[in-house]
Image: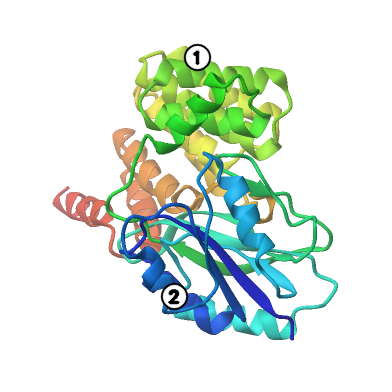
Amino acid sequence: MPTISLCMIVKNEEEVLARCLASAKPLVDEIVVVDTGSEDSTKEIARQFTDKVYDFEWIDNFGAARNFAFSQGTCDYLMWLDADDIILPEDAAAFLSLKETLDSSVDTVMMKYNIAFDEQGKPTFSYYRERVMRNCPLARWDGAIHEVVTPFGKIIHAPIGVTHRRKDKTDAQRNLRLFERLIQRGETLSPREQFYYARELYYNARYAEAAAMFERFLNEGRGWLENNIEACRVQAQCYNALKQPEPALQALLRSFTYDAPRAELCCELGYYFFARNEFEKAVQWYATALLCPKKEASGAFLLEDCYGYLPHLQMCVCLDRLGRTAEAVAHNEEAMKIRPQSKACEHNRMYFEGK
């Protein structure tokens, strides 16, 4: 059975680190924790789980810190987690099973990263990330921010989740500041960095700048396909925030030049027409969303609600506005099958009973 080193970088993570390490310790053979300047009890907590706790001077570069952490790993494979990640019991069991049966020819294991959840704890936003990699020179992080290891060699996709449970207190502008320091130093942003810089501008409500950066990213034509599609979706949201509906529509339609329609984009188009009371057109786009397959292995950002729940729910509303009550009721019931605790579906059910 292969051995695995968990290699982490941390800073001021006393609230969540023990939770993370406790969930991971039974799964790995070695834990490496690299501290980048904590001022709390993070390092003391780390030492409760491992004696391999190191310091790394912070240089505004997550990739450099992670590469240092990887350099301390001594096992066959290297794995990473963030301090506010956990591995739930059902995923831990699946991970151990994978570890016991992992073919020695595998170089990269892609695993699901679950980021957001519904009221039942079911993931609503997830995507595959490179999670476990052979300990070799190719396992190297690239990028100062939103860093990545390019998957290499024989790659497998394991439907095992890492659950991201964000801390209550986060610095929403941290990544934006790091990007702007790079720019101030005269460094050229890679296509991936352009994409994530645009997203950080969007998250910080700098919509015009974000839309312009997405445009630059797309026009240069060097981006990864999934980032191109997501750029179109978020650029449309920027234009919506700026009350510019026509550029928003064009951004959504542009996504189809990169690949077949994705449910996320179809739902955005459905809402575009719904907001203009063009319910027949909205229904067509929501119906198209229901036909879109999930492309999990592509690494796409998946908004789970767009692959069933949301299209059914929105079709219910649109069809009711069109006077097609029986169809509307049917779609509400389909949505409720997917999310039985949905307050929106329960409200709709009561509304139809009243009618």
Q: Position of residue 261 (x, y in %)?
A: 63, 37
| 70 sits to left or right of 178 | right
Q: Residues within 10 Å of mark 1 (few under 14, many from 20)?
A: some
Q: Position of residue 350 (x, y in %)?
A: 17, 55
**What label does residue 293 carry, if any?**
none
Residue drawn at point x = 47 percent, y = 13 percent: 246
What's the distance in space between the residues labelled 2 and 1, CA to CA?
53 Å
User: Is 152 in front, or is 229?
Assistant: 152
Give the residue number, with chain letter if any, for mark 2. 47
| 242 sits to left or right of 101 | left
* 272 to 168, vertically: above or below: above
Residue drawn at point x = 62 percent, y = 47 percent: 64
User: Is 28 in front, or is 308?
Assistant: 28
| Three-letter amino acid code at the position of disc 2 | Arg
- Dot 2 lies on which element? helix
Q: Position of residue 174 (x, y in %)?
A: 40, 37
- Dot 1 lies on which element? helix
Q: Quadrant of residue 335?
A: bottom left
* 137 to 64, vertically: above or below: below
Q: Quadrant of residue 118?
A: bottom left
Give the residue number, with chain letter if any, for mark 1. 247
